[in-house]
Amino acid sequence: MTKKQKKVLLRIIVSFLLCGIISFFKCPTILYLIPYIVIGYDILKKAWKGILKKQVFDENFLMAVATIGALLLQDYLEGVAVMLFYQIGELFQSYAIGKSRRNIGALMDIRPDYANVEIDGIWQKVDPDEVEIGTIIQVKPGEKVPIDGIVIQGNSTLDTSALTGESVPRDIHEQEEVISGCINLSGVLLIQTTKEFMESTVSKILDLVENASSRKSKSENFISKFARYYTPAVCYAALFLAIVPPVISLLLSMNPRWSDWIFRALTFLVISCPCALVISIPLSFFAGIGCASHEGVLVKGSNYLEALANAKIVVFDKTGTLTKGTFEVIDVIEGQYKKEDILMYAAHAESFSSHPISQSLIRAYGKEIDSSCVKDVQEISGHGIVCQMNGHSVLAGNIKLMNQYCIEVPVISKSATIVYVAIDSVYAGAILIADEIKETSKQAVSNLKKLGIQKTVMLTGDHEGVGKEVADELGMDLVYTQLLPAQKVEKVEELLKNKNKKDQLVFVGDGINDAPVLTRADIGIAMGALGSDAAIEAADVVLMDDDPLKIGKAIQVARKCIRIVYQNIYFAIGIKVLCLVLGALGIANMWIAIFADVGVMVIAVLNAIRALRI
């Protein structure tokens, strides 16, 4: 408990004991004002401040009016009881929210406190914000990696659970990249930083989590608008209940029973307090986002969590999402040139590209690339590379590139990605490259269908044979092949146009050239995007690693969260409407009113906390 919560708890205990003493010794009932002041002075103070600021209609005002009214009617015990149980409910709510925040804080406890930097031959702790790019930092066992960088000395294992949700440590060696937020478990590492702290992975993740609450769901916006109009409405209704029936009775020459109707109005006010809704709905989403973070899924806002719960179509990019994206050359088919020359020209042409296929060609060539002999490099998106090398015109790309330059090539009917190479407008040969399907991709697609996803779609730039083979193996409903990046956007727009209005379309990509499609989909999920700034910026949901199973997990978290939200809405409104009717009819007394306020709030908050676990 915090110091403030302990203070409130002490006031509750003191007030409870004072009420017990006054009741047991049958003291004058006016003495109930003492425990009332002890337990309720802060509520009265907040209500008065609200009146001065012309922000009258809130729960403090409702409690103040209801309890003061009860005291004026000399129902001292019930007036104190309302305030006492209200404070108990507020304390419970404060503790529950604090606990959920601490749970999420523990899950996301990745912010580094310092970085070890060598100054005048001595390793000193400095603020990570002060560390510049290229600085050598030391990370000892048990310390967090403070900034993204490359290991230049040392071997170790890293705990990435706070980032990815995976409990298995990751081995790290020299010349490998490390991301901030991981915990060093064994050896001492020397890391050369590649980013400033504010641009590092840990900063971006914390920024996403901290700003998630600003993107509110439709349910949260509904509750905010509901409370804005509901609270004044019930206040006027209570005033009506206190005045109109007695006046009508007077006009009819009947006993007006002022005290009875005023007490009904006060009961009405206590019942109507909207705390259960105003507190539990945002708490449910907060807990849901925290649960997703624990599973290695960053959701940028509760609006995206709500949309994810209604997902019915999931569209995948193939390379790097369903497949490992680690291409390997499996064969070289000779044309007018020998295998060694075909690889040499292709590797040099592709040496300026960071695409996984380009990197596989460079690895297969296995020799040092002399980039000085390559000139006039032009990368044609979705086609390939055109360049000049040692006075020769070189083309390296797919069949579309060959057709564009009117170069005749043989038909190769093999299930692999084919890079055709042409030199001086003559077909030189072809390189076959294969990509391995991830172990969990098939299970991920199967899980999505079990979750009620109506359509799974795969988009790829590969030729038809490779695309269909992968789609069939994974159990995809639809596959579109030989697509340029712009055509992927067109296919997503076509799917969006043909879906039901309430259904949500999810696009999952690995962050490489996927930003336009991630932005266009109802929900964009960037997979394994910790190192891709563009993907983190464009996506609505970020998976901390490249496991496709996390997609189904994210949908499960979202659906559980939304179920809890609607349970709380229906339960709270249902109980309150019932008790309001009973209160207006004089059937519900102040004790039932206390349950309708505090009891319902406690139950709703307990239910909301369930969203922390899946």
Image: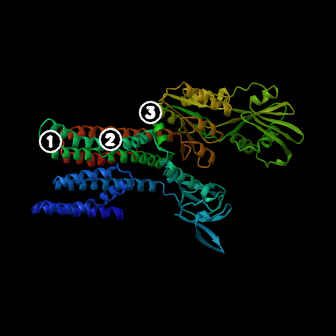
Looking at this view, name the residue that lies furthest to the right: 391
Residue 70 percent across, percent down from the top left: 20, 52
Q: Of residues 434 and 352, which is closer to you in this image?
A: 352
Residue 532 visible, this orientation: no
The amino acid sitting under disc 2 is: Ala
Dot 3 crowding, Cα within 10 Å, few <14, some 14–19, many 20+: some
Q: Nearer the viewer, mark 2 or mark 1?
A: 1
Mark 3 lies on residue: 451
- Give the amino acid at mark 1: Pro
Residue 127 horizontal side relative to residue 108, left or right: right
Say what secondary structure mark 2 lies in.
helix
Q: Which residue is mark 2?
A: 233
Q: Earlier in the sequence, mark 3 or mark 1?
A: 1
Quarter-of-image position of residue 461: top right
**What is the CA distance from the residue labelled 2 to the residue labelled 1?**
24 Å
Q: Quadrant of the N terminus?
A: bottom left
Q: Nearer the viewer, residue 92 or 200?
A: 92
Outermost residue on the left side: it is: 26
At a point 25% along the width and 63% down the height, the residue shown is: 38
Residue at image point 56% right, 43% down: 546
Dot in front, 3 or 1: 1
Residue type highlighted by circle 3 = Leu
**Residue 273, visible in the rendered structure:** yes
Task: Indicate the position of residue 386 as horizontal and vertical percent values.
Answer: 81, 37
Mark 1 lies on a secondary structure that is loop
The answer to which quarter of the image holds residue 246 is: top left
Q: Which residue is mark 1?
A: 256
Where residue 400 sits in the image (x, y, percent)? Answer: 75, 28
Per the model, the C-alpha gap separating discs 3 and 1 is 60 Å
